[in-house]
Image: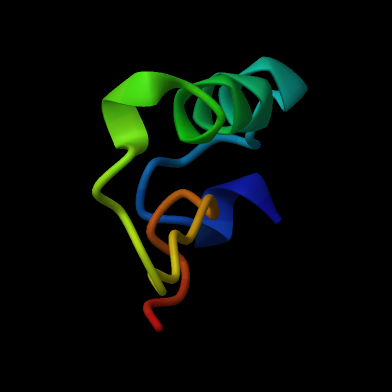
Amino acid sequence: MAAGTPLRREGDPAEVADLVAYLVSEESSFITGANIDVNGGLYFS
């Protein structure tokens, strides 16, 4: 599966956790209604 992604590796749970931490922070307060893909570039919304 990893070889089939543009980044040539599997994702790490910490990478998803980093996004979640950002989204619950004040820094992301202006983001609304967004699709954020955490998939190594395999698919785009």
Residue 41, horizontal then vertical, whole percent: 38, 59
In this rendering, the answer to whether 11 lies above or below 27 is: below
Q: Nearer the viewer, residue 36 or 10?
A: 36
In this rendering, the answer to whether 45 lies above or below 22 is: below
Total number of numbered discs in the rendering: 0
Q: Nearer the viewer, residue 13 or 22?
A: 22
In this rendering, the answer to whether 38 lies above or below 29 is: below
At 61% from the left and 31% from the top, the residue drawn is 20
Residue 7, horizontal then vertical, whole percent: 38, 42
| Left or right, residue 17 beside residue 21 | right
- Colouring scheme, one of rainbow, by chain, secondary structure, one colour: rainbow
Q: Quadrant of residue 44?
A: bottom left
At 36% from the left and 64% from the top, the residue drawn is 32
Q: Nearer the viewer, residue 6 or 39?
A: 39
User: In which quadrant of the rendered image does the C terminus lie?
Assistant: bottom left
| Left or right, residue 4 beside residue 29 | right
At 24% from the left and 48% from the top, the residue drawn is 30
Residue 34, horizontal then vertical, whole percent: 38, 69
At 71% from the left and 56% from the top, the residue drawn is 1
Residue extending furthest toward the bottom:
45
Q: Quadrant of residue 21?
A: top right
| Left or right, residue 16 beside residue 39 | right
